[in-house]
Image: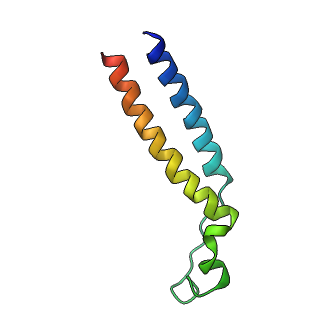
Amino acid sequence: MGWIDWTLSILTLLVGVILTIIVVMQDSKSSQSSITGSNTFYGSNKSKTLDGILSKYTVVISLSFIVLCFLTTLAILK
């Protein structure tokens, strides 16, 4: 394995650990009915709360993790 393979592998591990930490930090989703869904103050301003921010980071970091896994596999197979 060359230095690119090692670098991609280490980045994949770091992103995986960061993704795990962010997912653990999120609150568990409570079941809300459609009556109390987005009509409440929390529902309409969810993107400004910590849970909303962590949710956005989860999507971005998970997509980065998928791309890094794919690139690491391609680099190792070459």
Please, is residue 68 above or below residue 46 in the view? above
Coordinates of residue 32 in the picture (x, y in percent):
57, 79
Most distant residue in the left direction: 78
Q: Residue at x 36, y 20 (%)?
A: 75
Please, is residue 47 above or below residue 71 in the view? below
38 relative to 8 in the view: left or right: right
Coordinates of residue 52 in the picture (x, y in percent):
62, 64
Q: Residue at x 51, y 30 (%)?
A: 12
26 relative to 5 in the view: left or right: right
Coordinates of residue 2 in the picture (x, y in percent):
44, 9
Q: Residue at x 68, y 67 (%)?
A: 49
44 relative to 25 in the view: left or right: left
**Where does the C terminus fall, quadrant-wise?**
top left
Q: How is the image coloured?
A: rainbow
Most distant residue in the top direction: 1
Q: Residue at x 51, y 86 (%)?
A: 34
